[in-house]
Every structure is written in structure tokens, then in C-alpha cells.
Image (spheres, rainbow, N blue to C red):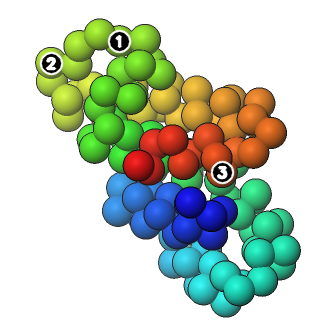
Amino acid sequence: MTNEEILKKAIEKARKNGWKQATYYIELYLRYENSPALLEPYWRKFIFSHDFAKAFAIYLLKEREQQARKLLGIEYMPYINIEIERHSDLLKEILLTQMVLEKEPLKYLEKFLK
């Protein structure tokens, strides 16, 4: 996937899971999608924001439970709705930390979008 495709999918997943600033960044994405160099400062701001990371963590917990459990080090999540609330902040911090450590943070997100 290209960086633009990763951004588009990540924005959509986060938006569906409560990301409050989604509309603003979707508009920026659509405005600059043909000019990736102009878009880069904006995506770097939002993928490292706590709101985006929390919404993306909720997406992982809801739709990608196995990947979320692996990141959290949890074997079983018996009550998924309770666990989402309980673990979304921890998973958010793990995601933010991992993205900071990655040379290409969008490629890190891509692993969870397939």
C-alpha cells in the first residue's frame, strides 16, 4: 500500500471509532492527496495525537482482537466491550510508542489495516 492509501484507511478506521478531528483531516487529505509532500506535516501531527491513537486502538480491539491481544500481552478477552474500555488507553500508549520508534510509522499502521 502507498502512504496515501494507508492514511486513507487509517483515517476511516479511526473516524468510525470516535476520532473527533476526523472531518478536518479528511478534508486536508483530500486537498493534498495528489501532493504527498504537502500532506506529510499534517499526517505526522494527527497519527501521533492521543485522540487518533485511542480511536485506532478501539478499532484494533473491536475488529482486530487477536492483534490487539498480542500487543497488550493478553491471551483471552472474555468480555470484549468491558475490555475495550479497560485496555484502549494502554493500547493507545503502546501504539504511540511503537510509531515513535518506527522509521516509517505509516508502515507500522499498515500491518493492522490488512
Judging by the rendered image, the residue that carries numbered circle 2 is 78
Q: Amino acid at mark 2?
A: Pro
Q: Residue at x 63, y 69 (%)?
A: 4
Residue 106 is labelled as 3
Quadrant of res 97: top right
Give coordinates of residue 21: x percent, y percent.
55, 68
User: Can residue 68 be seen at all in this image of the molecule?
Assistant: yes
Real-space Cα distance between discs 3 and 1?
25 Å
Which numbered disc covers residue 91?
A: none
Residue at horizontal 36 percent and vertical 55 percent from the top: 17
**What is the C-alpha distance between the residues marked 1 and 2?**
11 Å
Tally of numbered discs: 3
Which label lies toward us, 3 or 1?
A: 3
Secondary structure beneath disc 1?
A: loop
Please determine whether, in this image, residue 54 is positioned above or below residue 35. Answer: above
Residues packed near mark 3 inside 10 Å, few (<14), some (14 to 19) or many (20 plus): many
Please report the residue visible at 29 percent of the width from the left and 31 percent of the height from the top.
65
> Residue 37: x percent and y percent?
84, 74
Q: Residues within 10 Å of mark 1 (few under 14, many from 20)?
A: few
Q: Quadrant of residue 13?
A: bottom left
Q: Secondary structure at mark 2?
A: loop
Q: Which residue carries the number 1 mark?
A: 74
The answer to which of 104 and 40 lies nearer the viewer is 104
**4 on left or right of 92:** right
User: Element under label 3?
Assistant: helix
Q: Amino acid at mark 3?
A: Leu
Mark 3 and mark 1 lie on one chain; the one further toward the N terminus is: 1
One can see residue 24 in this view: no
Q: Position of residue 61 (x, y in %)?
A: 33, 36
Q: Earlier in the sequence, mark 3 or mark 2?
A: 2
